[in-house]
Amino acid sequence: CFYHTDKAGKCSAFWVKKFAAHKDEYEHEFIPINYGTEFPFDTIQKDEQIYIVDYSILPEEMERLLTITQDVTWIDHHISAIKRYDNFPYEIKGLRYDGVAGCMLTFCYFRYINNTDKPFDMSMTDFAPRFTQYIADFDVWTFKYGNDTKAFEMGLSIYDLDPEGMTWERLYGKEENDMISTIIRQGRTMLDYRDFWSKEYCEHIGYE
């Protein structure tokens, strides 16, 4: 699973870990990747299951990938990447939709769409866990949940967000509500510190 290095990408990778059926003979690998990084074709095995979430590769790179394995699932929301694939000659599994964060699309894909003919519907997003709602809300800058969204995003910064780590499992488990409340509280403190520090810095160091 190749995932974007931000919080939404890591959350997307968690949903792959949680819900994707393991159908090949190869070991699980969750690999963070950012734009400008060379895609590691030489590490991909023949017919290996590949997930690319909250991230995209160029159409010519996708064609090269498909010569190694046909089992590719691509989930993304970046409109520039989606448009690049207009008239692409091959069908690619997954979900591409502008305006909805990659982590939300990944959740909806596995929860409602995978192995069905269902099209994506915005109503599917209403049933995502709260932590995914907050991360998605920040990622596409809708701020439906206002300052809670900003505080949650900031608070998450002090947690280990490895897709295979325990933070996501705790958020998805019985601790969800308590942990979200803690993260929001921590995030508010961090935002207050950031804003106070920035104001003081500008007043004492800044000049025209």
Image (cartoon, grey):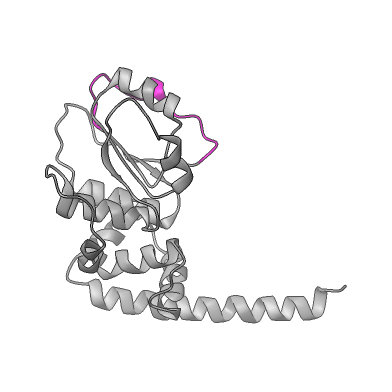
In-front residue for pair 27/67: 67
Instruction: Characterize the magenta stretch by its predominant secondary structure.
Output: loop
Left or right, 178 with reference to 60 = left
Q: Position of residue 165 (x, y in %)?
A: 30, 53
Asked whether residue 79 appears in the rendered view, the answer is yes
In-front residue for pair 88/8: 88
Q: Give the range drawn in magenta.
A: 35-49
The residue at the far front in this view is 87
Q: Where is residue 61 in the image (x, y as percent from the top left)?
A: 43, 26
User: Is residue 40 rendered magenta in the image?
Assistant: yes
Give the vertical position of 167 relative to 176 (above or below): above
How many badges with numbers are in the image? 0
Left or right, 204 with reference to 127 = right
Q: Position of residue 203 (x, y in %)?
A: 78, 81
Seen at 35% across and 24% down, the residue is 65
Q: Position of residue 19 (x, y in %)?
A: 17, 48
Seen at 21% across and 28% down, the residue is 26
Seen at 16% across and 26% down, the residue is 25
User: Is residue 104 rendered magenta in the image?
Assistant: no
Asked whether residue 33 appears in the rendered view, the answer is no
In-front residue for pair 187/16: 16
Query: In which image quadrant can residue 170 be found?
Result: bottom left
Give the vertical position of 5 relative to 191 (above or below): above
The residue at the far right in this view is 208
Query: In which image quadrant can residue 139 be found?
Result: bottom left
Seen at 44% across and 40% down, the residue is 83
Give the vertical position of 24 relative to 109 (above or below): above
